[in-house]
Image: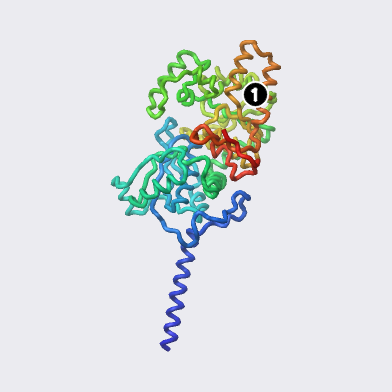
Amino acid sequence: MKLWVIRMTAVVLLWTCVLHLMALGEIWRPRVLKGWPSCFTPSESPLLSLGIYKNNGYLMVSCNGGLNQMRSAICDMVAIARYLNVTLIVPELDKTSFWNDPSEFQDIFDLDHFITSLRDEVRILKELPPRLKTRVELGMFYSMPPVSWSDIAYYQNQVLPLIRKHKVVHLNKTDARLANNGLPLEIQKLRCRVNYAFLRFTPQIEELGRRIIKILQQNGLFLVLHLRYEMDMLAFSGCTHDCTDEEADELTRMRYAYPWWKEKVINSDKKRKDGLCPLTPEETTLVLRALDIDRNVQIYIAAGEIYGGDRRMAALFAAYPKVVKKETLLGPSDLRYFQNHSSQMAALDYLVSLESDIFIPTYDGNMAKVVEGHRRYLGFRKTILLDRRLLVDLIDEYNNGTLSWDEFSLSVKATHADRMGSPTRRVVIPDRPKEEDYFYANPQECLPQPDKPSTS
């Protein structure tokens, strides 16, 4: 009898241990990525070995910038949290920048999908546990901006010890805080998985985006023009070509009004010649015509309010009568919940841009780069990447009569023959990460690629 009791007790203890291990495994084991594209196949050397996970602390992050800058940052923060074995608190979105958008994470992204999709990769909580939340509310936590373009060793050697010491660390800047290159393959592929599978917009945004796309597709082919000629961009960049004196003064005053825009004194002409300004609507019209874009194609403007309004858009309207935007395709009631929420409006433009027959950005900002990379992932969809430095010279030569129209058009076509979003390797520039190709514009680790990398 005594032996039987001992045996039963041992069995109960054994099953209790098994059940606990199974529960832990459900939370922390590496996901078997069934059904994902081949680039999402798990590595043979996972970041975390099964059964040895230990939560090293909690990571809070405050994203800064517009929608797509924050989108990239969220992907980076997930990868960092995964590598450091820390619990990520749902990222806080920027509400204080120029756009002044009060949207929370769950207003733009599908929060439940985000958390559940990553449950076997990273532990994500909507808020800190009560005891730690109280400490944070009392200011008892460590806050810091991580160094830009850092490799994973920086986070392992500099940030992780702080998390272990303080239990909670708050990263108050997230833009471009993780390197483009030189990271473990598992990290790069996780960035892709988050961006293309786990971080999707809310059902409301997705549904309205599909409606816009359906309207456009019913009327034939459509081109998305990311015409980045809005007041904030011109003020920030100091680009005032073809602006009136009053407009140039207004843009300068705005630049000085925002302290986080560091560059104040800007030579607009030089910046334009260096290819660092967005093309104007008039310049863009010339380029579209030179590329033989069909006059009758639908052109969807993915942008906010164009600076200068109809006066600056007159040339584009004259050359392409089927210019539309979300506000003209939908009724006011369709967009009433999105008004005054610039990031939600930008999310609609993002979805339409992905599905367009051609995508053309007039400036290589965050949306242009992230959409470019996403279209590569979707099958290298046609994306015309304008060489602004060469184009402004060609445009000036055409406008002053040095080039005929045929010569101008031929030069524009020749320049962009191999700038259509086809497979290529990222350009790597050691010690100058800001100048090299952005990871999210060409996530080559997740795409079929040529064999040899590009260097500069």
Task: Name the outermost residue toward the left.
Answer: 138
- Depicted 88 relative to depicted 10: above or below: above
Q: Residue at x 28, y 46 (%)?
A: 138
Task: Name the outermost residue toward the bottom.
Answer: 1
- How is the structure coloured here? rainbow
Q: Residues within 10 Å of mark 1 (few under 14, many from 20)?
A: some
The answer to which image quadrant residue 447 occupies is: top right
- Residue 76: x %, y % from top left: 48, 44
Q: Residue at x 58, y 55 (%)?
A: 33
Residue 277 in sight from this viewpoint = yes
* Image quarter (top left, top right, bottom left or bottom right) of the C terminus: top right
Using residue 449 as the reference point, say whether residue 115 is left or right of it: left
Using residue 24 as the reference point, say whether residue 225 is left or right of it: right
* Image quarter (top left, top right, bottom left or bottom right) of the N terminus: bottom left
- Residue 11: x %, y % from top left: 46, 78
Residue 300 in sight from this viewpoint = no
Q: Which residue is drawn at 49% across and 14% down?
A: 244
Amino acid carrying mark 1 in the image: Leu
- Residue 25: x %, y % from top left: 49, 62
**Foreground residue among 379 and 177:** 177
- Residue 259: x %, y % from top left: 37, 27
Q: Name the residue under label 1.
A: 288
**Foreground residue among 170 and 84:** 84
Disc 1 is placed on an element classified as helix
